[in-house]
Amino acid sequence: MNWSTLFSTMRTGDPENKIANPDRVRTSFLRDYDRVVFSSPFRRLQNKTQVFPLPGAVFVHNRLTHSLEVASVGRSLGKVVGNALVEIHGFKEAHVQEFYRHELQSVIATACLAHDIGNPPFGHSGEDAIRNFFRELSGEPKSMLSDHLSDNQWKDFVRFEGNSNALRVLTNSFNELDPGGFKLTYATLASIVKYPCRSTEGFDKASGTIATKKSGFFDSEVQTFQRIAAHLGIVQKDQAGHVFARHPFVYLTEAADDICYRVIDLEDAHRLHIVSLEKIVELFLPFFENTEGYISAEYLKNKLSKVRDDNQKVQIIRAAWIGLMVEKLSKVFLQNEASLLAGTLEIDLMKCLPERDQRLIEAINEYSYRYIYNYRSVVEIEIAGFNIMGGLLKEFVHAVLKPESQRSSKLLQIVPPQFVITKSKKELYKDIQSVVDFISGMTDLYALDLYRKITGITIPELR
């Protein structure tokens, strides 16, 4: 891969002879950012669970605030790396130099902004609920799907993945005539796809290939990603063209997310009185022991000693740690430039850090898993979400499989027209996808409300 061809203003839905956008104020990559910010799927993230239940007396992060913060960190990573690449390579072509000095930061920020846009309600339990529902199908419903779906199409559901769904949300026009969905640039879309393979090849951790750790595109978006990969010169890992190397920009998007959730989940836990200030200090201050200046441990301790509010102290630690990790991971990215361009870096940037840093990060991971991700209220919302998602899927998938019944007809009237239900067995994959599109796009509250209504737990207008 080559830095000069890894970006493009080509958009999904564009003709091959497209004329580049002449606007020098709102460039193509800034337009990408704006299109995501003003979109309904992005706005709905404000009522999708990050970790802790929503809403509450203490305002914790939801998917929207998390995505905004990841975008802020991603912009910094893109700025540092872009400037460094210009200094290292010079780049004789003016447009290449312009991109890395001024535009890469916008690409990474937009990719970060949209990285969770395909996630269903109720956090990762929503993904698990979708997978589990299809895995546990039996009898006639299972036979009907087996008869009409290819192996990869079936695995799109039993291995449902929010990352794959993000590409679908961003590139699918659903029931609109104009193709291309959000019509984002190829550069931005490629920066989102963390696992560039189909569901069939994905979820193969034993392969040692980072691209197949999960999956990055459904059967319906295979050709879309193949066009993006061909246009940008992304390395192909298999002859069939279903497994690709990661685009180098993906590592920056992933790094921004990795930085944020490790510290912000703990910040939320502190506000909820689940984690003490002393524990936050114990987990994060060791990162600063060998640093100097305004990010040295001594400077940080002195600054904390002058602050009275514990929440403010945690915010200071969080800001300093994010700044430190942006600096460290930017260096790691540049140190691994050759393997990034060759498509052979099979670990994320955090795993490229020095051994001591990795041990400290592992301590954060272990503590978070034990005391945050398994905290009672977190587990309760996961169980509730699992049941709500499974209940909705049961109702609407059955309606698609048996559309002739009166109850099914009524249920399908609830599905918005943007999610087309053909009621044709030949289009069963598309119809089931429409149901999953509808349910995965819901907010937590809408999913709960609809579940209560269609199961008779609550009845509209009956008090």
Image: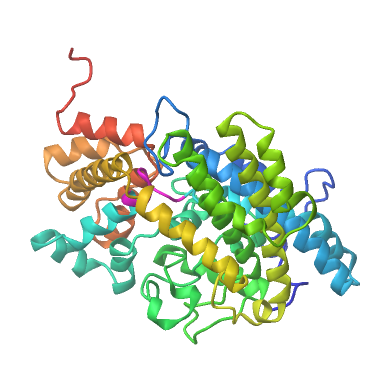
Tell me, yes or no, whether the highlighted magenta stretch contains residue 122.
yes
Residue 252 vertical position relative to residue 39 in the rendered view, above or below:
below
Q: Nearer the viewer, residue 275 or 79?
A: 275
Q: Which residues are magenta?
A: 118-125
Q: Residue at x 59, y 66 (%)?
A: 357
Q: Residue at x 63, y 48 (%)?
A: 71
**In the picture, which quadrant includes the N terminus?**
bottom right
Secondary structure predominantly adopted by residues drawn in magenta:
loop
Instruction: Determine the image quadrant of residue 377.
Output: top left
Q: Nearer the viewer, residue 379 or 241?
A: 379
Instruction: Determine the image quadrant of residue 39.
Output: top right
Q: Is residue 24 visible?
A: yes
Task: Give the image location of residue 109, x and y in percent.
Answer: 66, 51
Q: Residue furthest top?
A: 463
Q: Residue furthest left?
A: 139
Q: Nearer the viewer, residue 225 or 390?
A: 390
